[in-house]
Image (cartoon, rainbow, N blue to C red):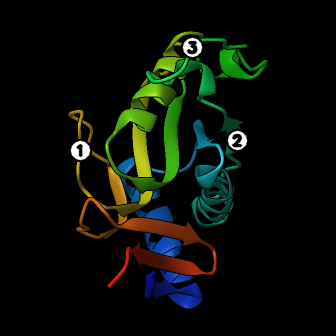
């Protein structure tokens, strides 16, 4: 397996600051924003973005973790609605994931959100958009567009972004 670093830790920090400013600009501030991280990859990212948006925007923002297991289209449904879901009624939601690929995870997350709440709007922020969409889903905020081959895998964390390729 070959591993290629695309972003290092300082690059990720810089990208997150840029994304935070883009969120604030598009939403004309940070008031009434709720960040939802899609577990597990989006959870750390949502927390970091929420902290930066709150700091730069001046208003505290909420941040939640969302497990989409009960809404995946490849597994049986067994969903327990989170207790915080009603807090999203009328809110501007920023749904966050680390890597956008086929769009199926985002579809499941949106379904989970709207099954229990009616937010004013839902925006999508991702650290990496790697293409290969199977559904018509597009991120509003993208840290890095990274066209990949279908046989590659993208690992994203605070420490950086790595493309993992199969054998030589």
- Is 17 situated above or below 133? below
Residue furthest to the front: 167
**Which sits earlier in the primary sequence, circle 1 or circle 3?**
3
Question: How far across and how far down the image is residue 25, in percent?
Answer: 39, 57
Question: Badges 1 and 3: C-beta atoms under 8 Å apart?
Answer: no
Cα separation, mark 1 vs mark 3, equals 23 Å
Q: Residue at x 67, y 14 (%)?
A: 79
Q: Nearer the viewer, mark 1 or mark 2?
A: 1
- Is 112 situated above or below 62? above
Given residues 148 and 89, the one toward you in this image is 148
**Which sits earlier in the primary sequence, circle 1 or circle 2?**
2
Question: How far across and how far down the image is residue 85, in percent?
Answer: 67, 19
Question: How far across and how far down the image is residue 66, in percent?
Answer: 65, 34
Which residue has dot 2 on it? 62
Q: Nearer the viewer, mark 2 or mark 3?
A: 3
Q: Secondary structure at mark 2?
A: strand
Which residue has dot 1 on it? 133
């Amino acid at each position: 397996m070959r591993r290629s670093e695309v972003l290092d830790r300082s690059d990720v920090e810089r990208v997150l600051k840029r994304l935070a400013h883009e969120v604030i600009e598009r939403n004309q501030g940070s008031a009434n924003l709720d960040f939802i991280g899609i577990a597990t990859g989006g959870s750390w990212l949502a927390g970091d973005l929420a902290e930066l948006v709150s700091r730069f925007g001046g208003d505290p923002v909420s941040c939640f973790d969302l497990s989409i297991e009960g809404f995946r289209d490849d597994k049986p449904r067994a969903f327990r609605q989170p207790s915080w879901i009603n807090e999203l009624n009328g809110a501007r939601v920023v749904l966050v994931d680390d890597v956008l690929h086929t769009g199926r995870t985002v579809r499941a997350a949106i379904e989970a959100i709207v099954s229990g709440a009616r937010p004013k709007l839902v925006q999508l922020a991702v650290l990496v958009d790697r293409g290969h969409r199977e559904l018509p889903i597009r991120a509003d905020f993208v840290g890095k567009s990274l066209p990949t081959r279908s046989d590659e895998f993208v690992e994203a964390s605070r420490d950086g972004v790595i493309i993992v390729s199969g054998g030589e």
